[in-house]
Amino acid sequence: MHTFRDLETAAYCPRKLYYRRRAGPPDVPDEVAACRSLAFEYERLLADDAALVAAPVEVSPTTFRSRIGSAKARLDRWPELADPPERERTLTGREARGVAHKVLHDPLAPSLVFAGRPPEEGVWEPQTVRLVAAAKALAWEHETAVERAFAEYPAYGVVRVVPLTTRRKAAYRKAVRTAASVDGPPARTDDDAKCAPCEFREQCGVRTRSLRSLLGS
Ligand code: SF4
């Protein structure tokens, strides 16, 4: 059975999944854990100026308050997102297992918290795959349909609804097929932007653009 993370990685770069499997599960860095904890403190951060200034937030306090205030007004599920009925729940589906950082109950929906920067709109494609995997596993456990997931980027004050569209489900199915087919090292991605932050680039033999320019090639 795949993990949610494996499927996310397969959608990012199949070769990265190959290296990650050989390296074993990574530890969660302290800064990622600190960022994720922000997603459980929205109301406190809105109410406490000093706490917000001290928090690992990547935008100004004004922007954070404005964005979270907007999410609070826009999202009918805000009370459950701010104070979730279930936290850090391990889900096991038909094809994948992993952790949903929050599970909302009425109706059922998973929410995943991401430490990085959000795209201008929607969610990054590999994160879409992880969200669909969590929603499908939740649906499988409860034998019911799950139509939406939530993506949270708390360091940027961004919370988004992610409907499980046909396109997103297709991306998930493709990632499942890719993860199942990886045994030897697949070809490198041709997207340099993905390699720059990849922790396996040395093993992979990829020189990032900045290194190439330093070397004058
Ligand atoms: S360095 Fe690039 S090609 Fe190599 S594993 Fe990482 S993302 Fe994939």
Image (cartoon, helix red, strand yellow):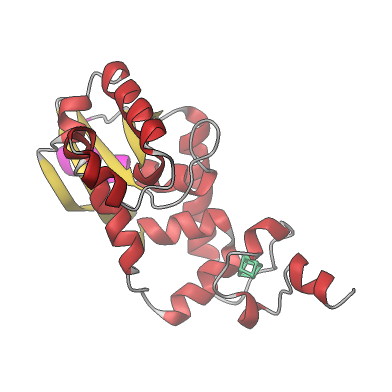
Residue 31 image offset from top left, x and y in percent: 35, 63
Residue 115 at least partly seen = yes
Of 186 and 88, the residue lying toward us: 88
- Label total for image: 0
Of 140 and 146, the residue lying toward us: 146
Task: Locate residue 164: give its quadrant.
Answer: top left
Decide: is 84 above or below 161: below
Task: Spot the residue most to the left.
Answer: 85
Of 173 and 11, the residue lying toward us: 11
Residue 177 image offset from top left, x and y in percent: 51, 55
Residue 1 at least partly seen = no
Residue 43 image offset from top left, x and y in percent: 18, 34
Decide: is 165 above or below 51: above
Which quarter of the rendered picture does the C terminus lie within? bottom right
The residue segment tinted magenta is 135-144
Tell me if 172 is positioned left or right of 3 in this view: right
Tell me if 67 is positioned left or right of 209 in this view: left
Magenta residue check for 141: yes
Magenta residue check for 137: yes
Of 202 and 41, the residue lying toward us: 41
Q: Residue at x 14, y 38 (%)?
A: 84
Q: Ligand 1 shows up in which quadrant of the image?
A: bottom right
Q: Residue at x 38, y 41 (%)?
A: 132
Q: Residue at x 35, y 60 (%)?
A: 32
Q: Residue at x 50, y 49 (%)?
A: 126
Q: Name the main secondary structure of what is drawn in magenta.
A: helix
